[in-house]
Image (cartoon, rainbow, N blue to C red):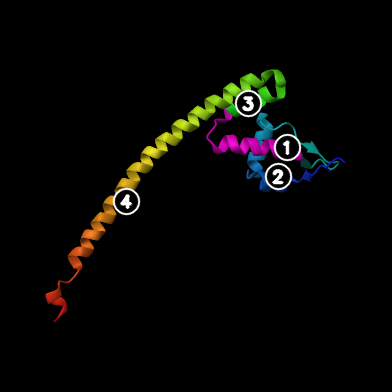
Amino acid sequence: MMRPVSVYTPGEAAEESGFSLDTLRYYERIGLLEPVQRNSAGQRRFSDGDIGWLGMLRCLRGTGMPISEMLRFAELTRAGDHTVADRIALLEAHDRAVEAKIAELREKQSAIQYKIGYYRDVLALDDLDRVPDEADAST
């Protein structure tokens, strides 16, 4: 038994994908998203396949892939299975860039954590300075 195909309005597609309506139109205009089907009134209707593809685009964009590389990935995908090795190479290169960015962020996070520790030490010393000694506490 075949699963029924879902149809999404632009608003539903935006909600499902996390992209704004303007971004969906832009992605369609530049070719990241294939032309979306339209109903008899000319209103755009997104398919499950469109939503799935938008999920992949959301992942790539969320990891910082430039739109030019996303376009290249889309072109390769549409060209067929003979481009799988090229798609792997593109994704591996992007994966290396993501790893480098994570390493850079870890270094910066380490500096932030050091500073947090420093300021906690400052607060602890301030608290020690404010603790009354026993002679003061008895009066």
Q: Secondary structure at mark 3?
A: helix
Sequence-wise, the earlier of marks 2 and 1 is 2
Of residues 115 and 67, the one drawn nearer to the viewer in this rendering: 115
Asked whether, in this view, residue 19 is left or right of residue 4, the answer is left
Name the disc covering residue 73, or none: 3
Q: Residues within 10 Å of mark 1 (few under 14, many from 20)?
A: many
- Determine whether the residue tagged by mark 2 lies in a helix, strand or loop: helix
Residue most toward the front?
A: 134
Q: Quadrant of residue 47?
A: top right
| First-in-chain label (2 vs 4) | 2
The residue pinned by badge 4 equals: 116
Instruction: Read off the magenta span.
Output: 48-68
Name the residue: 76% across, 40% down: 48
Q: What residue sits right under mark 1 in the picture?
A: 50
Farthest bottom residue?
A: 139
CB within 8 Å, label 2 to label 4:
no
- Vertical relation: 7 (above or below) 136: above
Q: Are marks 2 and 1 in contact (CB under 8 Å)?
A: yes
Up-down: is 54 above or below 12?
above
Mark 3, Cα crowd under 10 Å, few <14 / some 14-19 / many 20+, is many
- For badge 3, the amino acid type reads Phe
Which disc is residue 2 wearing?
none
Amino acid on which disc 2 is placed: Ala
What's the residue at 47%, 32% (across, down)?
99
Q: Earlier in the sequence, mark 1 or mark 3?
A: 1
Nearer the N terminus, badge 1 or badge 4? 1
Residue at 79% across / 42% down in the picture?
Answer: 43
